[in-house]
Image: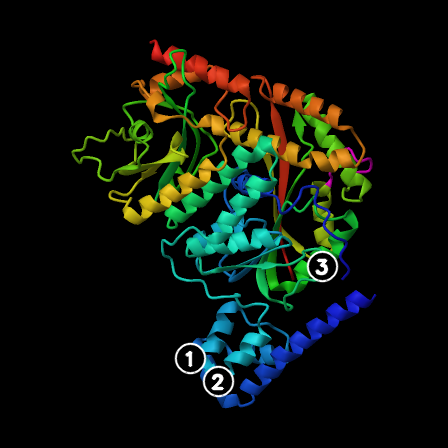
Amino acid sequence: MKPVQVAATEKDNAMEARLSVLAEIFSDTGVIEQFSKSTGIRASTIYRWVAGTSTPRQSNIRALLSAFPERRAQLEQAFSALLPLASPSPTALEEIPSIFYRKVADAISSTPASLLYWTVVRLVMRQAVLHLDPDRHGLLILLVHCMPPLEDGKIRTLLERAQIGSGIWESDVEQKAAFLGAESLAGYTVSRCQSAVRNYKHEVSIIPAIYMPHEESSAASPILRAGLVAGCLLFSSTQPGYFDAQKRKIGEHYASLVALGLEREEFYDRSLLDLAPMPAEEVQQRVIAQLPPAELIGDNTELRRWQEIERLLLHR
Amino acid sequence: MQGHGNLYPIDIESSAEMARLQLQDKLLTKTMGGIFPGAIDLSGVEDLLDVACGPAGWALEVAFAYPDIEVVGIDLSQTMISYARAQAQVQGLTNAQFRVMDVTQSLGFPDASFDLVNARMLFAILRASDWPRVIGEWKRVLRHGGMVCWTEMEPAGTTTSRAYEELVRLVARVLHRQGQTFSPDGYHWGVVSAMGRLLREAGFETIQKFGYLHESSFGTEAYDLSFQDMVVSLQLVKPYVVGAGVIDEKAYDELYAQTLREVRDQNHTSVTPLASWWVRKP
C-alpha cells in the first residue's frame, strides 16, 4: 500500500499549495472583482478555485501570472503540473533539432538491418516536411534513387522510392513510383552532385524541371557519401520563390541524414551517370499499373521488377 | 495507484517503432475521416489531454488545427516526449506541451484539469484489470461536462492471409497470458467489445459511438502504407513472441515469409475493425 499512500500525499501537497496561493491572492473581494472584470472570468469561478472545487484552465493560469507578477514564483510552483516546462520559441526556420540527430543516430545503432532504411527514411522525411512547411502551405518531398547500372555499366534512370507531403499533398497514403531522367531537376542534381533550384515556374533557366499541378517552385539536394551519389531529395512547393538559401541548406542537411540509412552499394560514382529522358508519368503509370506499387520494404524481387519496367521504358 | 511496468510488446525507445507509430497515426486518422470522429461539438474544449501520445503525431495535428485548444500529450517514453517537444517547436505550435508520464499510474494533474481526454490504441499497454482505474483517472482529471474520445481496434481483423492471421493470433495469445485481452480464449483482443461497458461502469454518459473498417486489401488506397506498417510491426514484435515461447524463431520466420507472399497477392483482402466512443462526464 505504501506507494499509493506516497502518491496521495504528493497530490494533497500540490492541492494545498494551489489553494494556499489562491486564497492569499483572493483574500480581498475587491481583488476578485477587479480580476473578474479585467479577464472576463466570473467571480463564482474564482470562488470555486479558492474552494478547490475547480481547477483553473491553462489560459486562466496565464491570466493569473500576468495579473499578479509579484506572485509569479508561487503560482508557477503551485501550477507546475499544468504549465509548459519551457516557453516555446516563436516559429522560425532553425537548425534541425539536436534530438532529431540523436534519434537518427539511435536508429543506425539499434535498428535491425532489415528495417534501417525504412526507419531512417520515414523519420527524416517526416521531420523534413514538418520543418520546412510548418504552416502547411503545401510541400512535397520525394526520395529519388539511382537505379543500378545496366549491362553497359551506365545508370540511365532514377526511381522515386518514397514521398511525403503537406497541405494539398498531405495524403501520402498512396505512393506512385515513377522514373525520372535527364529531363528532370532530380536528374540534373544527381548528375552534377550539386543542389539545384527552380524558384519560379516561368523563369528562364538551363536547369530542367517538369512541374506537376500546384507546384510553383522546386529544389533538389543530392544524397552523397564520400563523393559518391545515391540519388536526391526532391522538394516541391505550392509557393513561388519558396526555396531561399536557408531552406536549401536545411534540405541539404536532411539529404545528408537520409544518406545514413542507405547501404554503401547504393552509392555510385557520378561518371556512371548517363541519364536518358523518361516518358511522361501517365505513360509510365500504364506500364507500372500492371505490378504491385513501389514500397520501401522490398527485396531483390521488387528490384528486379523495377529493372524490368526500366528496360521497357528505355526501349519504347 | 500501483503500476506494473511496461507491458508493451515492442521496445518503446526503438526508432523503428517511433517511425511506425507516426505512420499508424496517419493511417488511423485517414480511416476515421479526420482527427476527431464524427461531428462532435468541440466549442467548449479549451484543455485537451492525449494519453499515451507516442511521437505525438495526432496531438500535434490537433494543436495545428485548433490553435485555441491547449494540448497536453503524455507518454512513458522520454525519447518520444523529447521528440514531440522538438516537433512542436519547429512547427511553432505554442499550444502543445508534452510530459513523461505513466498512463497506468495516477496521472500527475489536479482534478478537473481538462475538457477532453483522448486515448487511441492503448490495447497493448494495459491488463484487462487495469482499465477501470485508468478510466477512473480520465474521469478525475476531466471537468464536469468534459468528454472522453477513446478509440481502439481489433488487430485480429479478417484477412485472406492465413500466415498473417496466425502471427497476429500468436501475439494475442501471449498478451492473453499476461491478462491483457478481454478474449475468453486468447483468440483475439476483445477491447473493442468491452469499451462500452467499461465507460458506463465508470459513470460516463454516451454521446456517440463510431465504427470503422480499415481496409488494406491489395490495390486499395491504404494498401501500400498498411503493408509497411504490417512488415515493420511483425519484425519488431518478433522478439516478444519468440521470447514467450509460443513459437520458435525458424517457424516465425517461415510464417513471416509466407505472410509477405500472401499479402502481396493481387487477390489479398484485409479489413480491421475500429471503434471510437465519445462519452461525457456528468
- In the rendered image of this protein, does residue A5 appear above or below residue A139? below
Could you tell me the amino acid type at mark 2? Glu
Residue annotated with mark 1: A38
Q: In the picture, which quadrant includes the N terminus of chain A?
A: bottom right
Q: Secondary structure at mark 3?
A: loop
Mark seen at residue B105 = 3
- Quarter of image, res A24: bottom right
Residue annotated with mark 2: A70
Q: In the picture, which quadrant includes the C terminus of chain A?
A: top left
- Residue A203 left/right relative to A23: left
The residue shown at (47%, 80%) is A36
- In the rendered image of this protein, does residue A86 appear above or below residue B30? below
Q: Secondary structure at mark 2?
A: helix
Could you tell me the amino acid type at mark 1? Ser
Is residue B184 rendered magenta in the image?
yes
The residue shown at (49%, 87%) is A31
Q: Earlier in the sequence, mark 1 or mark 2?
A: 1
- Residue A49 left/right relative to A272: right
The magenta segment is B183-190
Where residue B270 appears, as percent x and y from the top left, is 61, 26
Do the residues bearing badges 2 and 3 touch, measured as CB atoms within 8 Å?
no
- In the rendered image of this protein, does residue A123 appear above or below residue B75? above
